[in-house]
Image: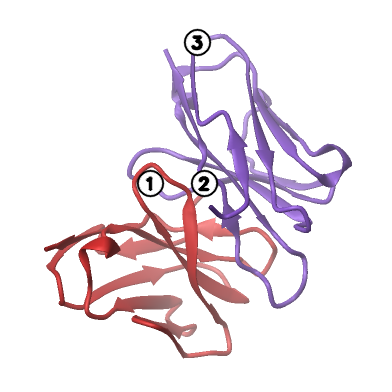
Amino acid sequence: SQQGEEDPQALSIQEGENATMNCSYKTSINNLQWYRQNSGRGLVHLILIRSNEREKHSGRLRVTLDTSKKSSSLLITASRAADTASYFCATDEGTYKYIFGTGTRLKVLA
Amino acid sequence: DTGVSQDPRHKITKRGQNVTFRCDPISEHNRLYWYRQTLGQGPEFLTYFQNEAQLEKSRLLSDRFSAERPKGSFSTLEIQRTEQGDSAMYLCASRRMDGNNEKLFFGSGTQLSVL
């Protein structure tokens, strides 16, 4: 089962532009995480935001969380060709089980 | 390299055969997770362990699937009587069981193709 829905499903931008992707989820959470996956590889953790936080930054990443709307957004600033990957949000459903969304496939054109 | 290793990386089998995958997590990680991922989709939760105890199993998981984690170290996932619909990437992930370290470390996955 998948809890989250990412939007858009696919995104194509030019190098240097910002990329924004959104995640919606269904149940109460303790935290929400974003992961990145290069084609055919495992997922790599990017950033975690707790339910009592509204915004978090890490390098070129900015994550927001709105628990009233059960939604989160991931912003990648000044994108690079190397950022081309799929991005997934994951929520803990208030337990230790992590449920992933459907993903946003980002393509950054050089 | 995240420190989580999976073996084999690729497996091709004929329908009806049994297959077994192995996952070696990071040594101090108590929790171990198995996910399945099909093309264009997000990882789908299958099951997870805390040490050697299997704490939850997805309702979507048929009884042809079984997972073990003897001694709380490596884990195996077995699929019996494989079907073409089992073709997918099987991902293993682990994490430490302390309050502030919730991030998962994933292996590179085992790509299963059932012919």
B96 displayed left or right of A107: right
**Which is nearer the eye, A45 or B86?**
A45
Badge 3 and badge 2 in a common chain: yes
**Which is nearer the eye, A30 or B33?**
B33
Q: Which numbered marker is on residue B3? A: none
Place residue A109 in its image quadrant: bottom left
> Whole-percent x and y of residue A35?
45, 63
> Whole-percent x and y of residue B44?
51, 46
> Which lettered chain is shown in purple?
B
- Secondary structure beneath dot 1 equals loop
Q: Which residue is mark 3?
A: B15
**Which is nearer the eye, A52 or B14?**
B14
Badge 1 and badge 2 in a common chain: yes
For the point 69% across and 62% down, which residue is it? A96
> Which lettered chain is shown in red?
A
For the residues bearing labels 1 and 2, Cβ distance under 8 angstroms: yes
Looking at the image, is mark 1 or mark 3 earlier in the sequence? 3
Looking at the image, is mark 3 or mark 2 earlier in the sequence? 3
Quadrant that contains the C terminus of chain B: top left
